[in-house]
Amino acid sequence: MTADTQTRDYQQAKLRVEELRSQIAYHEHRYFVLDSPEISDAAFDALVVELRTLEAKHPELITPDSPTQRVGGAPVETFGIVQHRLPLLSLANAFNEDDVRTWHRRVGNLLERTDFAMVCEPKIDGLACALVFENGYLTTAATRGDGTRGENITPNVRTIRSIPQRLPAGVPARFEVRGEVYMTKSGFEKLNFERGEAGLPLFASPRNSAAGSVRQLDPKVTAGRPLDAFLYQLGWQDGGAPAATHWDVLRWMKKLGFKVNPNAQRFKKFDDVIAFCEGWIEKRDSLDYEIDGIVIKVDDLGLQRQLGAVGREPRWAIAYKFPPTQATTRLLKIQVNVGRTGTLNPFAVLEPVQIAGVTVKLATLHNEDDIRRKDIREGDTVIVQRAGDVIPQVVGPVASTRTGKEKVFSMPKKCPACGTVIVRNEGEAAYYCPNRGCPAQRYRLLEHFVGRGAMDIDGIGEQLAYLLMERGFVQDGADLYRLHERRDELLQIERMGEKSVDHLLASIEESKARPLAQVLIALGIRHVGGEVASVLANHFGSIDALMDATADQIAEIAGIGPKIAESIREFFSLDENREVVEKLRAAGVNLREESGGAREGPLSGMSFVVTGRLEGFSRDGAEALIKRHGGAAGSSVTKKTDYLIVGAEAGSKLQKAQQLGTKVLDEDAFAALLREHGVDL
């Protein structure tokens, strides 16, 4: 090969490398920042492979900002120290509305005016960092440290795909942006699951996980962690026209390709600021990342400079902190209760602790495998979390506080309610009691039978359900339809006056007309929830046809697998369950599916998807309520979905809804929508 040919090949490779880097940077921005990819993963991977091949052939073309260098360089022995040009200040905290009003009044007095605009941004619970760019290239990334000096984490930050390595032309010669590195909740759960499977210690929270990941001496470890970053402030700049407001800075950073929180808002009225803060207390759990408050800033940068700082805290900003959703307390004992299908559910008895304004004494522990994976023991000091007003859960132990007196937990060998030897099916995490006559199961099944989404009988709460069973009024849900024969006896129950009894009996009578799908839910068949019940009702048209079907015939239905089919077949093979069906038939309960197309109602024409855990409804209950009033309840978010109803731990469906622009409602907003359309709750 001649020298001219080599030179020509080199120049072509150089041009292609630049072209590939530009294309990869563009598509990374579309995927990791805008969440709107234009090409498939395979097409993106092909671009990266081509770039790697060219760089391997021409290593002199490799630069620190190349996308191929995001996977991490060589490990370091220790982090260098970076001197911050301007200190990274800490924010003063406000814990209630009065604190925020006091801050606003103080700022107004200092400025001798109250007509200043403010910007409110979710306070990301992560690790603060400062990024310096020179001539459009990322050159330094540092932690906050003590505010004046931080650790140099540049190689690790280069692995975070949402942080650009190179910026468009026209940026200031040198400038610094500041933000927060964080880990998504879903990424944290996946990482902890993988660590548990590998026998590694678990991280306590997404924040701890993010901080630990960024401080890895080996960048390749950081590259394997699901880190992300929001940028929220311009630290300083050399060259370029200075912005007038913080809001302008956020828009400028977004234009450059930085990921800026989409929930930030600008307000002119103080009452709107308070409403924004209070609104996010309820909505915080709908996000796939943790926030612990709202940062409120004076928008005008000139006013910020005029206000200055006191000590290490700027006068022009304050952090409104949410009530805590986590706390530490002592786990006194692990006990086990029995669910309606016989599942044994371990739970923690705790020293009472205040979380988000609620006294927590009990918390869920899921199952024995989860307890062992997290290494939770009786007597441990534990982290307890109460998110989205759902049942509190034990996140994990604080192992450093152990004294050696803690006890390892094992599931009992027999059902605590009836003494039957418990069993565990292959492939399932839970143990269960196989005795269908178990009193605990019968009581829980009665509660389930009357609940929303099932027969939806108003007037029977936990206490009354227990009394009805204890005093022999009912043995199962079907017996409720004979309670009218015992009206006088019902009147003898404490707090059951004529009005209460008549309301109860009327509600029982009304429930006879519930759709077949709700009757199937009410029966409490294992693995049969709202969606499966609707499929079965639509396919078979009557409970008799379903009872006569073989497991193979049931399993052939789309959406119904062998596991569900076998559970249904097993349920109807038992005489006591068929007897319940016959009692329902004798009472006049509807056991056939309505024909004639979709049900008309106030929600007709509306399409819903329900995700996450709700407090006032079960997911099946919410879907049944929607269908009963004419709405459609789907299992996945599409362009045709009108509303996504979100509870705690909403996950990927929320991300999909945000991508498609689907309207997202929390539980309160959902209830308000129902009332607005005349649906009684």
Image (cartoon, helix red, strand yellow):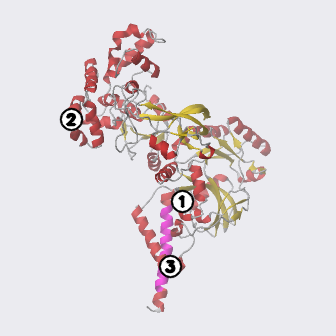
Badge 3: how crowded within 10 Å, few (<14), some, or many (20+)? some
> Which region shows up in magenta?
8-28
What's the amino acid at mark 2?
Ala
Q: Is residue 242 visible?
A: no
Is 620 rendered above or below residue 16?
A: above
Q: Check disc 3 and report the residue beneath it.
A: 14
Question: Disc number at residue 162?
Answer: 1
Say which element carries label 3.
Answer: helix
Q: Is residue 519 visible?
A: yes
Question: Disc number at residue 549?
Answer: 2
Percent position of residue 553, x then y: 21, 40
Q: Is residue 458 left or right of residue 512?
A: right
Along the line of sight, which residue is nearer the eye, 203 or 594? 203
Percent position of residue 356, x then y: 60, 35
Direction front: furthest residue: 405
Q: Residue at x 49, y 83 (%)?
A: 10
Residue 12 in the magenta stretch? The answer is: yes
What's the amino acid at mark 1?
Ser
